[in-house]
Structures are given as structure tokens and as C-alpha cells.
Amino acid sequence: MIMERAPVDEVANFVIERLGESNVELIHALVGEVGAEMALKVLKRAMRIEAQGGVLCPGSGAADEGKRKSAGGVWISLIRRADGVSEQKVNKIIKSVEKKRRKGNWSPDRGTTAADRRKQRVIGRLDKKVVETRAAAPKGKGVQGVQPKAFKRQTLRRKLLPGK
């Protein structure tokens, strides 16, 4: 298969597209670990299982008839049980990706980086300081020690957020 010789990123993107998976970072990490050939082999098995009706989630009985694993969930469980792949290594990758997501260092849409979010928080804090300082200043008198034009907010914004 031609796709087996493709770079890992292309294979990961192909797997993500076929599974309709939203956890892009996890799929990229797992494909990087198991390799393109194994990822595509498992994808083929996962698609066959999905075509036959999928897999019920653990603990769902007859009352929860509609609870099925997503296609991505089926693929990940098959990766865990694949020959030559350590289940502990897969679990470690999953935990590290989830930890990154909880920390906020990763954005599902990859449109917002951690650095951009930090810059936004700095600007928010500066805005808050300006409001607090102006509120504490006596009416009718200039605020001593405060730079004009609200800490030169626009200049700071331009420096911290170029292109905006």
C-alpha cells in the first residue's frame, strides 16, 4: 500500500480523517509510536468493526442499547492489543496527552497556542490594573505614577500580539 510509505504526519492525518476523531494530538502521538504500517492495518480492522455495528461501551447493558464506542475509541483499543505494541506504552502516551490538554498547553483546533493565551492574560491583567488605579485616584486630579493612555495599552498590545 502506498500510504504505508508516507510520512507519519500524513498517515496520522489520514487516520484522523477516516475516524472523524477530534483528539488530533493523541492520534499523532500513537501513530508516531506504532508506525504507519501498524496504524493503517489497525485502521482497516476498526473500519470493518464499525461497518458491522461497532463495539458497545463497557458496562452498557441492554438498557443502554445506544452506547457504542466511537470509531476512534475502537481504533485505540485495537492499537492497545496489537502485536508488537506495549499496552503500557500506549497508556503512557494517552495519559501524557490528556495531561497536556488539562494543563491548557494544547488547543484542539490548534489555532490558539499557550503563548497566545498567556499574552491575552497579561493584557487582561494590565487592563484590570488601569481600572483599579483610575478608580482609586481622586476625582479631578491626574493619577500620579501612571503612564498616560492607560499604561500605553495599545503599544503593549502591538508588542505582545503582533498582527492584531
Image (spheres, rainbow, N blue to C red):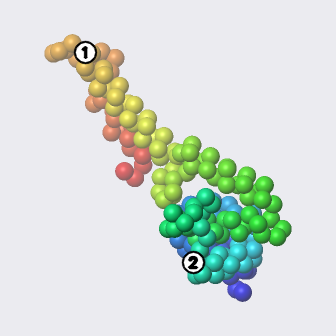
Are dots 1 and 2 in contact, CB under 8 Å? no
Furthest-bottom residue in view? 1
Residue 88 vs 148, above or below: the answer is below
Please tell me the numbered disc located at residue 1. none
Please give left or right for residue 40 compared with residue 71 in the image.
Answer: right
Q: Residue lying furthest left in this view? A: 140
- Where does the image place residue 45, in percent across and percent down from the top left? 68, 78
Residue at the disc numbered 2: 53
- The residue positioned 43% from the left and 37% from the top of the image is 121
Q: Which residue is mark 1?
A: 137
In this orientation, which residue lies closer to the viewer: 17 or 43? 43
The three-letter amino acid code for the residue at tag 2 is Gly
| Residue 102 in the figure: left or right of residue 121 | right
Q: Quadrant of residue 57?
A: bottom right
Quadrant of the rendering where the N terminus is positioned: bottom right
The kind of residue on which mark 1 rests is: Ala
Q: Is residue 99 left or right of residue 88?
A: left
In depth, the one of 60 and 9 nearer the eye is: 60
In this view, the residue farthest toward the right is 84
Mark 1 Cα shell of 10 Å, populated few (<14), some (14-19), many (≥20)? few
Q: Position of residue 33 (x, y in %)?
A: 75, 63
User: Regarding mark 1 in the picture, which secondary structure is present there?
Assistant: loop
Q: Position of residue 18 (x, y in %)?
A: 57, 76
Q: Is residue 21 visible?
A: no
The answer to whether residue 126 is above or below residue 30 is above
Q: Earlier in the sequence, mark 1 or mark 2?
A: 2
Q: Residue furthest front?
A: 62
Whole-Å distance between the Cαs marked 1 and 2? Answer: 68 Å
Residue 129, relative to residue 53: is it above or below? above
Q: Give the quadrant of residue 38.
A: bottom right
Q: Nearer the viewer, residue 142 or 44?
A: 44
Give residue 127's position: percent from left, percent from top.
Answer: 34, 32
